[in-house]
Image (tube, helix red, strand yellow):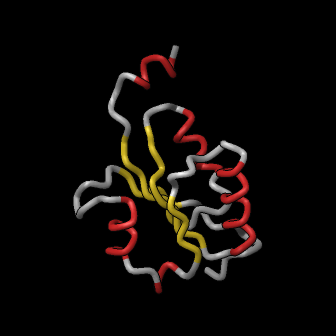
Amino acid sequence: MLNERATSQKKYKVLSLFSGAMGLDLGLERTGRFEILACIEKEAVFCDTIRLNQEKGRLSKELKIFEGDIREIDPEEVLDAVGLCHGEVDLIAGGPPCQSFSTA
């Protein structure tokens, strides 16, 4: 019932930062109300997991993956890759730090 209602409503456009394996993002997408357009993740192993989930159909093949340090990725490049302009992103989701990887 939730998914039936969600498909007839607007999908919010989302950019994911510090995505990890995208558990948070998968939860958002499964509500049927959010579309994850791009993700930024520094760790190669997590980017590999994201790509594998794309191949297996768990994530959209349209999802743009930016692998690298967020400080070195041009926000304009991300927006261009997903066909959006400033102000057209509805949600920026930021994953919580993984304690074993965080330097904070």
Placement of 99 over or under 6, stated as above or below:
below
Q: How many marks?
A: 0
Q: Is 87 on the left-hand or right-hand side of 14?
A: left
Residue under the image location 53 percent in, 71 percent down: 66
Residue that extends furthest to the top in the rendered view of this protein: 1
Instruction: Where is residue 101? Give x, y as percent.
Output: 72, 75
Q: Is 17 on the left-hand or right-hand side of 57?
A: left
The quadrant in which residue 49 appears is bottom right
Residue under the image location 47 percent in, 60 percent down: 38
Which quadrant is the C terminus positioned in? bottom right
The quadrant in which residue 41 appears is bottom right
Residue that extends furthest to the bottom in the rendered view of this protein: 72
Instruction: Where is residue 16? Give x, y as percent.
Output: 49, 59
Q: Is 100 on the left-hand or right-hand side of 47?
A: right
Residue under the image location 72 percent in, 45 percent down: 56
Pick the residue in front: 102 or 17.
17
Pick the residue in front: 51 or 23.
51
Instruction: Where is residue 11? Give x, y as percent.
Output: 37, 37
Pick the residue in front: 31 or 7.
7
Placement of 65 over or under 93, stated as above or below:
below
Q: Is 81 on the left-hand or right-hand side of 102?
A: left
Residue under the image location 72 percent in, 70 percent down: 99
Instruction: Where is residue 44? Give x, y as percent.
Output: 70, 74
The quadrant in which residue 26 appears is top right
